[in-house]
Image (spheres, coloured by chain):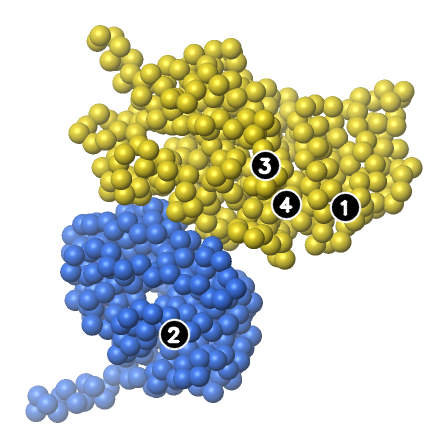
Chain colours: A blue, B yellow
Amino acid sequence: MLRAFFVALIMATPAMALDTGRIFVSNERSHDIWVFSPDYEHIATIETSRRPRDMRLNADRTLLYVACGDDDVIDIIDVDTLEVVDSIPTGPSPEVFAFSPDESLIYVSNEEDSMLEIIEADSRIVVHDVPTGAEPEGVISSEDGSTVYVTSEVADMIHVIDTEAGAVVDNIIVGTRPRRFVLTPDTNELWVSAELSSEIYIIDRATNDIKEVLQFLPPGFRPEDVTPVGMALTADGSRGYISLGRANHIAVIDGVTHEVIDYVLVGRRAWSVALTRDESVAVVANGLSDDITLVDTKTLRPIRSIPVGQVPHTVVIDD
Amino acid sequence: MRALLILVISVWAGIATAQEEVKIALVGLDPDPRYDDAIAYARIETSRQGDPEVAARMAIDDLALLTDARDLTIGFSAVRVAEAGDLVAAARALAEEGAKYLLLDLPAPEADAVAEALGPDGPLLLNTTAPEDWLRRRCHDRMLHTAASDRMIADALIQHFVTMQWQDVLLLHGKTERDLARAASFTEAAERFRLRIVETREFDLSTNPALREQNNVALLTGDTRDYDAVFIADSFGEFSRYLPYQTALPRPVVGATGLVPLEWHWSLERYGAPQVNSRFETAVGDGRRMTWQDWSVWVAMRAVLTAEAKSRDRDPAAIEAFLRSDGLRLDGSKGAQLSFRPWDSQLRQPILLATSNAIIGIAPLEGFLHQTNTLDSLGIDEPEFACD
């Protein structure tokens, strides 16, 4: 009886992953999201609130959340109908955000007023406003949700925030203009890109100490041209893809030894990178050439570049 | 003794604790002839309309978490002196009170006098608003420069000329020392790229009919070989603002109006600049926008605080070595990592080519290369540089 009830409940819930394989690209300047089919055909353009930047799918991949910096909202898009179905108000200039593991909380960095805002997803109540260094950007939650890491682009540090207390409990000083995070699949390491010092900092989660600093130099470039921002790791952690910004390349690195395997030429100011589920293609958003570049992860060659809206920011793939 | 203590506490805003205190002062003139109200009313970009003290305080706030994390307390004071003759005494007094850094918001001769008087054992001086190349060539041991030099400003504009294939230039300038310095830098920079200055002419602000060749725009810009653009050096800005659209030949006007090379402009939309501008506008509260002087003071304070907080070694010599090293990698929200050039202690930085409401280019422009750092395509390069 009870079991039957559960089955009925699940059946009644429309929230099922659709496995659309769709590729979403947010465009800061044209205020829209371009949607591509799995074979990279442009199938829709979704108008959003102004200046859409970071995007995340919910866990069952039915809804796409997008932070819209000039309208101070996170828009919610139905992955099936491709319509904006709701908006969550935030503080001024939301840039990057993360969900708590159970999706009950949204952690969003407010670039203009230097706060990490913790918003309860259902009630939309702001549970905590945690002051950060100026221009907070990257946000990532620990796997258990107890800790959130935030970068301050101006203070050159990572704030370690206790989400329960809503307070900064530790600060890690890193390189210049720290931007984004990834957690390694084993969760032991936190990687952070420092755009203006051309480095990736690898932080030991257990101690919050800096374990290693990675540097990149594609042939023919100088260190100051290398401005790493976006990062993507394979599910097994064996490989990393780092977008190198002004150096117009991505670096492909060994996830364990951290050695550079190759550099792949993409578009101008390679900003963010995402992997398809089978990890055969890395999709790179190029902020200054208004296109995305598809990179074959086997041959490590660019397949082609596809035009998108103005100033592409983030790529999210539903698969 | 007690009176002295009260005096010191009233001057320094920092709180005395067990933490290490770093004392930094901003030193300027009030009134400063460069920012005369009578000049500033024209609202031209080259005149400042407010005190950059707010920019220094903003930098302290911006980096507060970083300095806190290192247990550093920042003691800040802003000192304005009415008479240029009292500057040296004021700077000495600050040094005696333990100021480690003085941010100088002074004209070049006054900045030079302070450096000369305080000598090699004094506080580290940061020249924030004097662009004169001769001050760099003075090679004061204890002086760094965050204001872009006249030559850097000129080189940025010349890169645009080369990119646009504007070969022939009509050069106009006023009578002041500043105008002559700007004109001289422009001429030097133009020569390096073999641009042709078709004529150099001095303008006059009067309406005296006997000087009409100099005060009438049509006459001043006519009766010459064809030119691709007009460059004007005009620190007052009063003549230049009436120059565009009236030149004898329909040509763009650059320099003090039209396309203006600057360290900073409110219309820069990339590299986190909008956030810096909006923090500034909130901090200043009277609606004024961040000028290049504000940026220069802000970045000087950032440089000092970054070096203090990020140096791995607390030894003052190590901190200064880090401040002067390539490792500083300072972020000035102009998209490049900034550091001081070892040969002239000048902050290498991109220069914005701004109109009244847009950034047309950010020098170094594409295609201008350099053997070590493209930012060194702006300003006097190491092989050409010599101390006086």
For label 3, count other residues whose C-alpha is less than 10 Å away and answer few (under 14), some (14-19) or many (20+): few
CA separation in Å, label 2 and label 1: 46 Å
**Which chain letter matches label 3?**
B
Q: Residue at x 71, y 28 (%)?
A: B180
Q: Are marks 1 and 4 on the same chain?
A: yes
CA separation in Å, label 3 and label 4: 18 Å
For label 2, count other residues whose C-alpha is less than 10 Å away and answer few (under 14), some (14-19) or many (20+): few
Q: Secondary structure at mark 4?
A: helix
Residue pointed to by mark 4 = B156
Residue pointed to by mark 2 = A261
Q: Let me know if residue A237 appears in the view.
A: yes
- Judging depth in this view, the residue of A187 and B151 nearest the camera is B151
For label 4, count other residues whose C-alpha is less than 10 Å away and answer few (under 14), some (14-19) or many (20+): many
**Which chain letter matches label 2?**
A
Position of residue B262 relative to residue B76, above or below, is: below
CA separation in Å, label 1 and label 4: 14 Å
Q: Are marks 2 and 1 on the same chain?
A: no
Viewport quadrant of the C terminus of chain B: top right
**Which chain letter matches label 4?**
B
Residue pointed to by mark 3 = B385
Residue pointed to by mark 1 = B195
Nearer the observer, disc 3 or disc 1? 3
